[in-house]
Image (cartoon, rainbow, N blue to C red):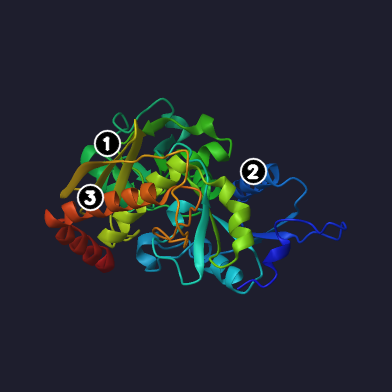
Amino acid sequence: MSGNGGAAATAEENGSKMRVIRVGTRKSQLARIQTDTVVAMLKTWHPGMQFEIIAMSTTGDKILDTALSKIGEKSLFTKELEYALEKNEVDLVVHSLKDVPTILPPGFTIGAICKRENPCDAVVFHPKFIGKTLETLPEKSAVGTSSLRRVAQLQRKFPHLEFRSIRGNLNTRLRKLDEQQEFSAIILAVAGLQRMGWQNRVGQILHPEECMYAVGQGALAVEVRAKDQDILDLVSVLHDPETVLRCIAERAFLRHLEGGCSVPVAVHTVMSDGQLYLTGGVWSLDGSDGMQETMQATIQIPVQHEDGPEDDPQRVGITARNIPRGAQLAAENLGISLASLLLNKGAKNILDVARQLNDVH
């Protein structure tokens, strides 16, 4: 653990050199843009503080010829970053929350979740199919996505399409779409396209009624060493309460299902008038079998925090001391309750079969 965290938050009164906060990130253009965004927000809250960005490749970046669901590693895009955090080579790391497993290695925590952008998926079409929708694409058109979740939901709705795996960062996937004739369209997260400034490539947004999204999609997470109190204090200002509570519910749902990228699981959350609504679903790989349900919980976010000792309990890997514990617990219990409901209705069998078939294929 970091032994020099005390210098992180403030400079010495006598003007001695301030500690530089080292920020770990993946090397892709999108990851760098996301990290720059987080650093810019931190600079707004902590003017004059210095940050150094350290980029590195992860397992998921290096293995590009295999579908993510086949690699069999839950921390594909986080492990190398966490290793640097453990070795005190960086002080915090920035992730897409959807890449972060619901159970973190000991000694780590998500210290901040930024305000969520649009969590939905988008369809980007080959130039010759601009103006089309998935419904109006020609018979046997190939649609690229590396997500079992998307395939399971969309294959049933659009049986005339063929869904094929496509890997690589956003730049690579768009280049494959535009320059090769293999794909008529690809499916990507709206948030990633927006952050890259490529909103004009969005040909169709898939709303939750058509395709529910991945747990945590659209939100950025800042992971830190759990005992590095100064860094936790530094980043906690970035927590967006509504996003945190929605994502606690989503992550609790996924954890209780024991899901991951090797099975099709999707969610949709809404906060309205003190109510948190969570819809969750599980499917077979081809989407022919599946179930989804919606539950809600009352989530009050009082102006005043509760009194009492604060022991920083993590909720599905998240530490959010500036959000009332009662609200966090209600969100977590909502996710667990919905997962239990689906499991009691037979979701375990659907997921077990999906895992087995994914392993075979």
Badge 1 marks a residue whose secondary structure is loop
Residue 342, horizontal then vertical, whole percent: 17, 52
- Which label's residue is closer to the chain start, 1 or 2? 2
Report, in whole angstroms, how far the alpha carbon at label 2 lies from the one at label 3. Answer: 34 Å
Q: How many marks?
A: 3
Q: Is residue 27 above or below residue 303?
A: below
Query: Residue furthest toward the top?
Result: 131
Give the residue displayed 78% in from the left and 48% down from the top. 48
- Residue 187: give x, y in percent of width and height: 40, 42
User: Would residue 286 be found to the left or right of residue 204 on screen?
Assistant: left
Do callouts 1 and 2 mark residues in contact (Cβ within 8 Å)?
A: no
**Residue placed furthest toward the front:** 307
Q: Which residue is mark 3?
A: 338
What residue is shown with label 2? Answer: 41
Identify the residue at image location x=27%, y=68%. 359
**In the displayed structure, does residue 35 sit left or right of residue 358?**
right
Which residue is rendered at x = 34% and y = 52% of the image?
Answer: 329
Q: Quadrant of the N terminus?
A: bottom right
Q: Report helix, strand or loop for mark 2.
A: helix
Select label 1 or label 3 by which is in front.
Answer: 3
- Where is residue 145? Give x, y as percent: 38, 48
Disc 1 and disc 3: Cα gap in Å?
A: 37 Å
Amino acid, disc 2: Met
Mark 1 vs 3, N-terminal side = 1
**Residue holding disc 1:** 139
The kind of residue on which mark 3 rests is Leu
Residue 82 visible in the picture: yes
In this rendering, position of residue 105 left or right of residue 286: right
Q: Nearer the viewer, residue 316 or 71?
A: 316
